[in-house]
Image (spheres, rainbow, N blue to C red):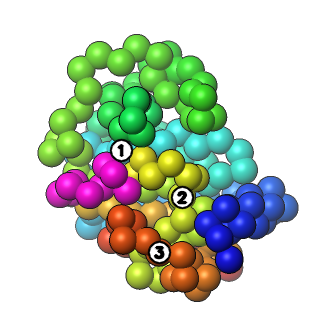
Amino acid sequence: MSKQKIRKDMFHQLNDLEEERRLQYNEDLLHQLMQTTEWHEAECIAMTLSRPPELDTQLVVEAAWQLGKQVVIPFSGKNSVLSFFIYEPTTELELSSYGLLEPKKRLNPINKSDIHLIIVPGLAYASEGYRVGFGGGFYDRYLADYGGRTISLLYPFQLNRIVEDVVEPFDIAVEKLLIASE
């Protein structure tokens, strides 16, 4: 099975997920995340701002803000390069050509070494942390020389052994997978 087919199948499953179950999974994953050492030690946390039908990262953002943590969000620049910028309640956002909410004003990108934890997005994962993302390789390139911690938040059906068959040499594994309880 190709990565493209896996992406298509995962989008179908995400779209078909009942809203009540989605809310349950989101709350469980936030609870799990907040119990981790990585979360407690991180002062600066990077993540994308999700859009339906993805896991709701706004819950994570708000929890981080309540604890005084800095939140940074990506901008997907030229040559598939990610840069991260501070995200605050007043940050103006725009929709990128990739369908992501990104900061409209992009002054002072955050140094990679100042990001302590990245919540890495994806659609399907192997148990070893390899993932099928949204295409483009943005995060694999960014993570190649990133020295901080990485976590992904998964709905149970996103853990899929078929991902092991499509891992490529340039794919970077996520350190920790948190999987919502059924």
For the point 80% across and 56% down, the residue is 15
- Circle on res. 105: none
Image quadrant holding the N terminus, namely bottom right
For the point 29% across and 16% down, the residue is 107
Identify the residue position indicated by label 2 in the image: 133
Secondary structure of the residue carrying numbered label 1: strand
Q: Is residue 178 visible?
A: no
- Circle on res. 46: 1
Asked whether the beta carbons under mark 1 and mark 2 sit within 8 Å of each other, the answer is no
Q: Nearer the viewer, residue 63 or 140?
A: 140
User: What is the magenta range?
Assistant: 140-148
Secondary structure of the residue carrying numbered label 2: loop
Between circles 2 and 3, the one closer to the viewer is: 3
For the point 42% across and 39% down, the residue is 80
Query: Residue 106: x, y in percent?
Result: 36, 18
Identify the residue position indicated by label 3 in the image: 167
Q: Nearer the viewer, residue 177 or 12?
A: 12
In the image, residue 116 sits, relative to residue 112, either above or below, namely below
Q: Can residue 30 be found in the magenta stretch? A: no
Asked where in the image residue 66 lies, by quadrant, the reply is top left
Asked where in the image residue 78 lies, by quadrant, the reply is top left
